[in-house]
Image (spheres, helix red, strand yellow):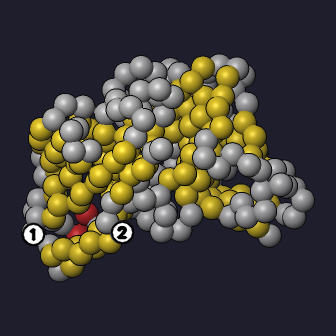
Amino acid sequence: GQNIDQPTEMTATEGAIVQINCTYQTSGFNGLFWYQQHAGEAPTFLSYNVLDGLEEKGRFSSFLSRSKGYSYLLLKELQMKDSASYLCAVRDNYGQNFVFGPGTRLSVLP
Amino acid sequence: DGGITQSPKYLFRKEGQNVTLSCEQNLNHDAMYWYRQDPGQGLRLIYYSQIVNDFQKGDIAEGYSVSREKKESFPLTVTSAQKNPTAFYLCASALQGAVQPQHFGDGTRLSIL
């Protein structure tokens, strides 16, 4: 079966660092993707990992361990505008399909 | 500019009525997807299509239908059999066979009158 798990909600303070975890069990693996979604808007692409390790893009980094079925998104120097939902998605090999986790709602407090 | 266009932005459905949501892309992507999102929830796959004239059911296909007559277009019909259609509907596309992310349209918010 396909299963992706993320924490439902997280809270952090402006200027801090937050790590959002994602664990997955999917039939095949062809990349893990992180999206940001503000309320009422479409998801926007943040980062992806295909190989194990850390990918850094400015204030955002994403890590992958395929053997553990685990990824995290790291957000540094948090800003108020980072308050949003963060979606983890895995692309499988077979249907070329994307399986989404439930999303983590992050609240950044002043 | 290349992108995905969904229309309308807001749609209201009467009891017993079928409604169709439009999704058009000019990114030359082979694969297209329809998702449903309920408040505070993640994305659930309704249908997807990897090639023209072919599509597959997702996890919640009941009460919905699609067509893929052209590469650029993947309309979704919400039929009267879908008893709880109120949700945010997102269309996405992606390159086939490549490790590339999906691109999303701006979504259609459907409500029942």
**Chain of the residue where label 2 is placed in the rendered structure:** A
Q: CA distance from mark 2 to mark 1?
A: 22 Å
Q: Earlier in the sequence, mark 2 or mark 1?
A: 2
Element type where label 2 sits in the image: loop
Q: Is residue A79 above or below residue B35?
A: below
In the picture shown, does residue B7 fall above or below B101?
A: below
Q: Residue at x 76, y 67 (%)?
A: B112
Query: For the residue labelled by badge 1, is the local secondary structure a helix, a strand or a loop?
Result: loop
Q: Percent position (x, y) of residue A77? A: 10, 62
> B13 or B7: nearer the eye?
B13
Q: Nearer the viewer, mark 2 or mark 1?
A: 2
Q: Is residue B26 above or below residue B20?
A: above
Q: Residue at x 32, y 71 (%)?
A: A9
Q: In the rendering, at what x and y percent does residue A76 appear?
A: 11, 59
Label 1 sits on what residue type? Gly
Please report the residue visible at 42 percent of the width from the left and 20 percent of the height from the top.
B97
**Badge 1: few (under 14), some or many (20 or more) residues near its Cα, within 10 Å?**
some
Please tell me in which quadrant of the rendered image residue A47 appears.
top left
Q: Is residue B71 visible?
A: yes
**B15 lies left or right of B22:** right
Q: Which residue is mark 1?
A: A15
Badge number at residue A98: none
Please rate how many residues cluster around mark 2, counting C-alpha atoms within 10 Å: few if below 14, some from 14 to 19, many from 20. some
Mark 2 = which residue? A8
Q: Amino acid at mark 2?
A: Thr
Dots 2, 1 in contact, CB < 8 A: no
Of all chains, the one bearing label 1 is: A
Residue B102, image x and y in percent? 42, 36
Q: Is residue A37 visible?
A: no
**Residues at marks 2 and 1 on the same chain:** yes
